[in-house]
Amino acid sequence: MKVSVEGGNQKVTLTINPKAAFNDGTPIDWTAIQATWKANNGSDKAYVASSTDGYDRITSVEQGKDAKQAVITFKGVNAAWSSLFTTFLHPKAATVDIFNKAYVKTAHPEWGAGPYTVGSWDTHSGNITFVRNPKWWGKKGKLDKRVYVNLESTAAVNAFKNGQVDYASASDAESLKQVKGLKGTEIRSGGSPFEYALYFNTKSSVLAESDVRKAIQQSIDRTQIAKIQFQGLDYKEPLPGSAVLYSFQKGYQDNVSAVLKYAPDEAKKTLDAAGWKPGDDGIRVKNGKKLEVGYTLMGDDPLAKATAGAFAAMLKPAGVHVVIKKADDADFSKILSERRFDLFVSGNRSMDPFGARYLCDFYCSDRDSNITGSGTPELDKEIRAAADIADLDQQITAVNKIEQKALQQYAFLPLYSGPSTYGVKEGLANVGATIFNSPLPETVGWQK
């Protein structure tokens, strides 16, 4: 691997293992990297790519000194380029029709590679078995086979207790209670690259006012919200301060605390100054309109209900009346895409440690992923300029400064992340709370 910057444009030279080949015998060479880029760069809208970020900044992928070397040229620079090529697309799977449809209820192991390959897959239940791959050219896996069983959380815990599976997530207090203390069981717990946040719909009539959004955020005791979520989990964490970086990452800053403090008395002053006067019933009024805000509650989860109730109680002293609106889980995507909410709590999981490159997804005014509808063209320009910084440390420094500006729109409030906790059979190595790390499949196995 070689990385250089010439004339302001980054060039990455990747040299591929001479033995590398897909399971059907096709060599893994520069054409696989080219195919990956072309399918994901957004130039052909017919490809249903999950994300074009990063790929859209590549201007060419060409053969190097031989077929086993690829030269990737970017427009500008991309500090997180390595996250773009963690997997390679088989050139045979790179046509629009195959890329979009061929993997629906079909595995196509012949287009893959690795120490294990698909032995069986029940498309109805989702259960899948991986067996040793005789075509693999790398290190041999420690297990003869790996069986994944698709179970709801409660069923998975019961299966673990009965010895049917070797590890299970203990994501809430009840499941942790079920597996804790079981003979031959280890509890493996750590932080999680998952963050829940409160989203404000800046396009709704009442939340269009920045001062109203600010007062709501000043009224929210995030520490209390975290206590509700972590009750019974024996877990603590710093309050999250960023949408894109976590407290355990290098370069992280608490950008939320830099611009916002829990200050319910100040919230009242903010609303006073904005012309919202307390009404006879305690609800503030402006121009004959009551300060009523909808809170969309998904499903029947007790913790979600408790959180909704906590928000309502916190905002009441400020004169904000929260109307809790129940919604079905099936309507989740519509609620977000059509902005059918005033306030909404949603979680975002990231398995990419290069979080700085996702700043635009949260804060750019022209991104569909920015469900708050906030942002300005000026801020968009700053965000996109940060993406052109080649040095990762310098990029993160710039991103922190920009995020503090973005958070002053008071449209997005990080709430909590929570633990990643598993019950694991003693002696099972490289399984459990791994945060960003995904242990290579050949390293998972039983200790001697």
Image: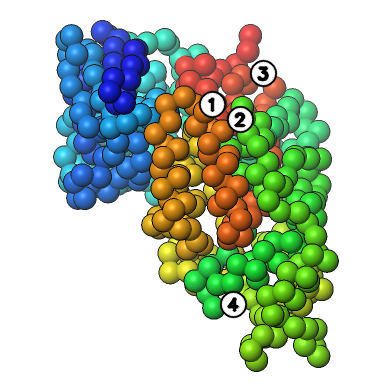
Q: Position of residue 30 (x, y in %)?
A: 21, 20
- Which is in the foreground here, disc 3 or disc 4? 4
At label 3, the amino acid type is Gly
Contact (Cβ within 8 Å) of mark 3 with mark 2: no
Measured from the top left, where is residue 327 in percent x and y? 56, 72
Q: Which residue is mark 4?
A: 206
What is the spatial separation of the Cα atoms under label 3 and label 4, in whole angstroms?
A: 56 Å
Which residue in the protein does label 2 denote? 251
Residue 49 placement: quadrant: top left
Kindly state the secondary structure of the residue where label 1 is placed: helix
Q: CA distance from mark 3 to mark 2?
A: 35 Å
Question: Is 74 or 22 nearer to us in this picture?
Answer: 74
- Classify 10 Å Cα crowding around label 2: few (below 14), some (14-19), many (20 and above): some
Give SS at disc 4.
helix
* Disc on res. 427: 3
Q: Is residue 403 above or below residue 111?
A: below
Left or right: 14 as drawn, with respect to 380: left
Label 4 crowd bin: few (<14), some (14–19), many (20+), radius 10 Å: some
Where residue 393 is drawn, which disc sits there?
1
Query: The disc labelled 2 sits on which kind of residue?
Result: Gly
